[in-house]
Image (cartoon, coloured by chain):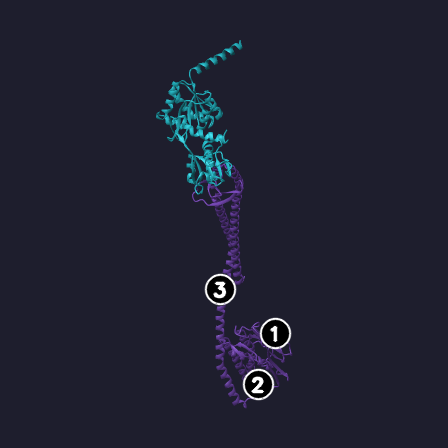
Chain colours: A cyan, B purple
Amino acid sequence: MNRGLTYSFILFISIISSIVDASDQLILGIHPYKSYNKLLNAFTPLSEYLSKKTGKPVRIIISKDYQTHIEKIGLNKIDIAYMGPASYVKLINQYGKKPILACQAINGKPSFQGKIIIRKNSMLSSLSDLKGKNFAFGDANSTMSHLVPRYMLLKAGVTAKNLSEYKFLGSHDNVALAVLAGDFDAGAVKEAVFYKYKDRGLKTLATTPALSEHIFVTSNKLKPATINSLRAAFLSLAKESDGLNIMHNIKPGMTDMLPVNDNDYDNLREIFQTLQRTNIIK
Amino acid sequence: MTPDKLKKNRTLIWKFTAILVAFIVIFDILVITQQTRLLEDETISRTNQEFALFGKLIAGLLTKNDYAYIEDSISRWSQKQNDIINLQVIAHNGFVIASYKRKVPDAKHKRFQRVIQYGKNKTATITMTRDISSVTKAINTLSIQLVTFSIILVTLLGFLLQRTAIQPLQKEIIDHEQTEDKLRQHTIKLREINNELETFSYSLSHDLRAPLRAITSFSQIIKEEASQKLNAEENGYFNRILNASNRMAELIDDMLALARVTQSNIQFTAVNLSKLADEARERLMLIGTKRNITWRIHEDLSAYADQNMIALVFDNLFGNAYKYTGKNPDANIEFGCIYPDTGVDMPDNVYFIRDNGVGFDMQYSNKLFKPFQRLHNDSSFEGTGIGLATVQRIIHLHDGKIWAESEKDKGATFYFTLNASPK
């Protein structure tokens, strides 16, 4: 009798959940670039906005790491994914094309750049002068504080072997301070960090190519009508009365959601291919 | 207590007070400087300990190239210590890696610096500025306390000293001054009385001369005219009258001489005593009867004295010697000096006049210089008994001393002192 009750309860739950699934709920997946709670708070206004626009409930999930995140959207286990340009390039490379919803714009710009920095009084004038010098990178996985600058050095004929020393200092700030303190001759940072420390005695040796910003992609499984309504919701976000608040909640400085094409990420793709060829990344 | 002693004691008390005050001031300064140094040392050692700890932390962060975390560490460290005004980490190239600044208006501060090593022979400098106004405040408080304490101590001691030493001393000084004043007044009064007496005796002596002269003259006339009418007994009476009159005239002359000495002003000059003595001898030999006397007058003796008065001294003392050696067929009279030609060490020379006459009994020596006191009866040695009193007065007027030594029948020696040179 007890057993029968338990079975009937499990059955009931599975029926209910299949009904919810069937009722077309949307899952918004985020990569873990901040703590779980912070990310949940940051994206809740957007999920509520999307839910209102599509008429479907939107649930937020946060993946345990970047690779899992790529897998989930690659295998269409989540419906909407927010991701950085490097992850996007990996995703397409591994799982083929995905419908693109929008690209974020920071201060109106849908792209971002990095700087290779030196001290103001430095005699260096070109990237090739860096041979025999030491160089500070941020994080080994960071696009702007390692991968893109590494590609640029390679193109200028500067390899790890002909640098006297190179080191990963963890953060963009540490790279800027290390160069200023004279512990390193040059370093790579994102643009914002360069401007933060510029007045304390930095100048640019080289600027990276402009890379397209973070992107929202969607699952291949969704109906075209849903995709269209989602895309429309993203692209019109800036015109909404609380659109700016929703975006600022995700990232201060975010001003718009703009249309973007897959080939806007071709320059990054080429950078990755080059780095893979030279075994700098796998 | 004499005025000198009083003065000495007073200066002693002031000296003691001054030394006490100086001692307290020195003590205060010592305590304050010591305490300042202690507090400063404490700050320095605390800073050194902090540098050791903080320097290790910073060196570790620099080695890891974690510059961003240094900024955090600096502000966290500074906020823990509420006396840090400024804390900086400066790279070897002068770049300020991290800096903490707190605005403290007009705070007294001290700057510390420590060079740390990191990585492979790399250096950075940590500078720290500390607010040391707490040290200054503590020292100020201590100074105020010490100064207050010192003032109270000095006041208390001063009060005690005033009560136990200065006040009694002042009372004694006032008493002493009053006594002195009284004495002075007495002396003045005495001198006045004395002057009056002397004037009186002088005029008395002077006025007695005229009637005495009349008595003598008329007695002489009567004797000359009536001597043959009178029998031997009556003539004897007349002779007695005449002798008595002459003797009285002598007495009066001597008394006038004594009074003149007292009233005349003393006039000091360099006096050749040997010459004066010789002159006195000559005067004596002119009036005296011819006798065999051996004179010894030492040569080149001199003194700083009144010439006329000293002549009178010689007249009297030689007169006495002559008189009392009258019965000696081998008379000796000597004038000399015990310390001839002494220098500055002996301002008073001691002179003597010695004879080998009858002398006197030393037990009566206290009567010797008193007027009208005679140690020998009239019949054997004539005299008035005023001569030595006159001599004594003259020597005393010269601030000198006079005394005599003798033994009966073995002569007498009179000593007197005079200034060898002007004082």
Mark 2 chain: B
Residue B285 — which label? 2
Mark 3 or 1, closer to the camera: 3
Amino acid under disc 1: Tyr
Instruction: Estimate the spatial distance between the alpha carbons at disc 3 and disc 1, rounded to whole Å.
Output: 37 Å
Query: Up-down: is A171 above or below A225?
Result: below
Instruction: Estimate the spatial distance between the alpha carbons at disc 2 and disc 3, rounded to whole Å.
Output: 52 Å
Amino acid under disc 2: Met
Write down the residue under mark 3: B181
x, y percent for residue B115: 51, 44
Circles 1 and 2 on the same subunit: yes
Q: Sequence order check: which comes first, mark 2 or mark 3?
A: 3
Write down the residue under mark 1: B364
Mark 3 chain: B
Mark 1 or 2, closer to the camera: 2
x, y percent for residue B298: 59, 80
x, y percent for residue A183: 49, 40
Q: Is residue B97 visible?
A: no
Nearer-the-camera pick, B107 or A256: A256
Q: Sequence order check: which comes first, mark 1 or mark 2?
A: 2
Q: Quadrant of residue B391?
A: bottom right
Residue A13 — which label? none
Dot 3: within a 10 Å radius of its alpha carbon, few (fewer than 14), some, or many (20 or more) residues?
Answer: few
Amino acid under disc 3: Asp
Q: Is residue A273 visible?
A: yes
Query: Up-down: is A281 above or below B249?
Result: above
x, y percent for residue B351: 58, 76
Nearer-the-camera pick, A10 or A19: A19
